[in-house]
């Protein structure tokens, strides 16, 4: 596809979603131990312009108009924290002027204590907030935040946003075995999220290759325990596990190889799904993938007994 848009991809939360990448790899406020994009290359908290807002908005609008089948959301899920983009609200407004597809954003909520960030997020039809822990020491261990960030400010900002927001608000908590999986940590996180009162509270596990090789999947017993504690705090109908893969229905719009590279730059894909992707495009999956590996465009990563295809990023010297 283009420079800023990828997919559509199947989302466990949002159905079929056209992704928007408004942040270059990898500018973020956190360097989460489980991040599927690896360690943060440029840790920062200052909002600024990364790409011309008209370029981003126009590419999204054009891509939606060229889709052969309907999508559920246009979703900002970039190579870093989307709210670092000072033009975020401007881009969303331009998109919503031209298309009627709901617009969503997945944010780590680290800058939500800022009035301008809450104002930008209020423009979205759906906002997903990361809440991995309500305990400062656990938050620091899991999310490895920029030193200028304070969890108290983040949590206060989340509450302020939840009180005023009129769209669909969801939360996501990633369980990292041994870090935020004690009963006390889970109870405190669930207690805080119950005050936020989201439409849905999702519990995730790191099913894709993480930034740190030592990150482990929690046991089934632990996942069930976390689910039970969340359901106790929020109510059974408000809690859902995200412990399975989305499925193989990744699609492309124009050039399947370019679109594939755009997808795996932000969304590592299982090898068997990659094969199906290229088969649907009428290409030989093995030949295409081996060529991309040979050129250094992608890498194969083993994790959890499966092979994933990921975009190979050059790291700053």
Image (tube, rainbow, N blue to C red):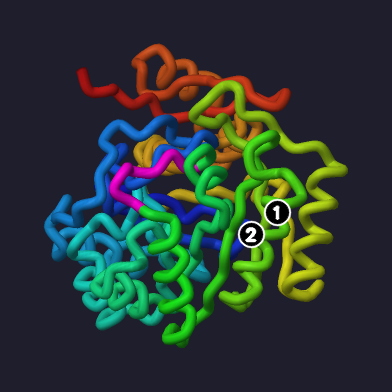
Residue 293 screen position, x and y as percent: 43, 17
Q: What residue is rendered at 60% in x and 22% in y? A: 214
- Point out the image quarter for the C terminus: top left
Q: Nearer the viewer, residue 2 or 141?
A: 141
Residue 98 image-quadrant placement: bottom left
Q: Residue furthest top?
A: 294
The kind of secondary structure element at disc 1 is: helix
Q: Residue furthest right?
A: 221
Give the magenta part as a residue range: 143-149
Q: What residue is rendered at 65% in x and 50% in y? A: 204
Pointer 1 local density, CA inside 10 Å: few below 14, some 14–19, many at least 20 = many
Residue 213 in the figure: left or right of residue 111: right
The kind of secondary structure element at disc 2 is: helix
Residue 147 is inside the magenta segment:
yes
Residue 96 image-quadrant placement: bottom left
Q: Which mark is residue 63?
A: none
Q: Nearer the viewer, residue 174 or 135?
A: 135
Q: Which secondary structure is most common in the magenta stretch?
A: loop
Q: Which residue is mark 1?
A: 186
* C-beta proximity under 8 Å, tags 2 and 1: yes
Q: Which residue is mark 2?
A: 189
Q: Is residue 53 above or below residue 255?
A: below
Q: What residue is rendered at 33% in x and 43% in y? A: 146
């Amino acid at each position: 596809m283009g420079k800023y848009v990828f997919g559509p991809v199947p989302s466990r939360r949002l159905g079929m979603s056209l992704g928007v990448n408004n942040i270059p790899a990898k500018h973020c406020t956190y360097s989460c131990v489980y991040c599927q994009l690896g360690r943060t290359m440029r840790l920062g908290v200052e909002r600024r312009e990364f790409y011309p807002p008209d370029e981003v908005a126009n590419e999204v609008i054009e891509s939606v108009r060229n889709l052969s089948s309907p999508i559920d959301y246009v979703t900002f899920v970039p190579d870093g924290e989307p709210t670092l983009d000072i033009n975020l609200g401007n881009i969303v407004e331009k998109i919503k002027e031209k298309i009627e597809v709901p617009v969503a954003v997945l944010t780590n909520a680290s800058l939500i204590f800022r009035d301008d960030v809450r104002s930008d997020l209020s423009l979205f039809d759906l906002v997903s907030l990361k809440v991995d822990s309500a305990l400062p020491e656990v938050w620091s261990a899991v999310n490895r935040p920029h030193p200028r960030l304070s969890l108290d400010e983040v949590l206060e900002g989340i509450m302020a946003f939840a009180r005023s927001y009129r769209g669909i608000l969801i939360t996501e908590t990633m369980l990292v075995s041994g870090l935020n999986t004690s009963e006390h940590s889970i109870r405190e996180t669930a207690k805080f999220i119950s005050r936020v009162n989201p439409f849905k509270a999702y519990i995730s596990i790191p099913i894709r290759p993480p930034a740190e090789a030592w990150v482990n999947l929690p046991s089934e017993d632990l996942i069930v325990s976390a689910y039970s504690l969340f359901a106790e705090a929020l109510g059974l109908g408000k809690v859902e596990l995200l412990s399975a893969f989305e499925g193989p229905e990744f699609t492309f719009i124009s050039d399947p190889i370019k679109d594939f590279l755009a997808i795996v730059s932000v969304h590592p894909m299982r090898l068997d799904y990659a094969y199906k992707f290229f088969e649907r495009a009428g290409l030989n999956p093995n030949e295409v993938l081996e060529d991309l590996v040979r050129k250094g465009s992608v890498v194969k990563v083993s994790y959890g007994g499966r092979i994933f295809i990921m975009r190979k990023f050059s790291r700053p010297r």
